[in-house]
Image: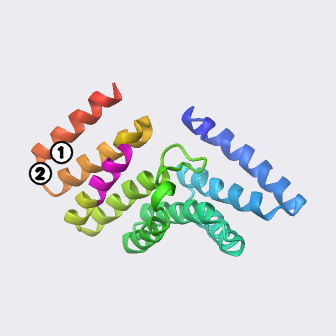
Amino acid sequence: ASLAALGDFARNLEHLRRAQALAESAGDERRLGWTSAYLAQSHYTLGDQAAAIVAATRAREIAERLGDLPMRVVALAGLGQAYHVLGDYSRSRALFEDALGDLEGELARERFGMAGLVSVATRVWLVNSLVGMGDFEAAVARAREAMRLAEPTDHPWSVAAAHVALGFAHLTRGDLEAARSVLERGLGRAR
């Protein structure tokens, strides 16, 4: 996440590929799973959705074999993002909802090495998929959930992303005043 925050996604990918090779040579399945989960995020960010799906699928398989719930959630989110970008909104929705089913209680406040709270990021992407499917009411409801989770943490990325998601959901359903209000609040928080 540190290189991602700097926008150095290509260098991040190089480091993750080296980590993957080390994990494979050491036979360390847990590290290989996490490396694959993070590789999925890097591939998605750099626009290689096919590679993101391969890496996230590998991470998901390892997570399920090891019973590693956080790894499974990050892998599902990576798969959901890739399928969303490819326009497969129903598949991405199902993956995000599956991930959210595991993010209850204290897990809703975890980042698992990601830039923001995974429970918020997953809802943000779910909002995007719901909008793509034309389910605007569900999109607003999920965006409000993201806001409720993000606000008390005061985590900058999570709060900003939740504001954008709620503003986008209002905008796409045609409620310009509600969109303006939430986006102005979000901009104020960002400043």
User: Could you say which is closer to the camera, residue 161 or residue 84?
Assistant: 161
* Residue name at image x 51 percent, y 56 percent: 107
From the top left corner, tell me how far across and down residue 95 is, in percent: 46, 70
> Where does label 2 land, which residue?
175
Q: Tag 2: residue type?
A: Asp
Circle 1 Cα neighbour tier, 10 Å, few/some/many (<14 / 14–19 / ≥20): many
User: Could you say which is closer to the camera, residue 32 or residue 159?
Assistant: 159
Badges 1 and 2: C-beta atoms under 8 Å apart?
yes
User: Is label 2 in a helix, a strand or a loop?
Assistant: loop
Q: Quadrant of the N terminus?
A: top right
User: Could you say which is closer to the camera, residue 88 or residue 114?
Assistant: 114
Q: Tag 1: residue type?
A: Ala
Given the current orientation, which residue lies at the most extreme right position?
Answer: 26
58 sits to left or right of 156: right
* Residue name at image x 63 percent, y 69 percent: 60
User: Is label 1 in a helix, a strand or a loop?
Assistant: helix
> Where does label 1 land, which residue?
179
From the top left corner, tell me how far across and down residue 83 is, in percent: 47, 67
Bounds of the magenta span? 142-150
From the top left corner, tell me how far across and down residue 125 is, in percent: 40, 57
97 sits to left or right of 112: left
| Magenta-colored stretch includes residue 148 | yes
* Residue name at image x 47 percent, y 60 percent: 81
User: Could you say which is closer to the camera, residue 156 or residue 184?
Assistant: 156
How far apart marks 1 and 2 lie (CA) works out to: 6 Å
The majority secondary structure of the magenta stretch comes to: helix
Q: Which mark is residue 15?
A: none
* Residue name at image x 51 percent, y 61 percent: 77
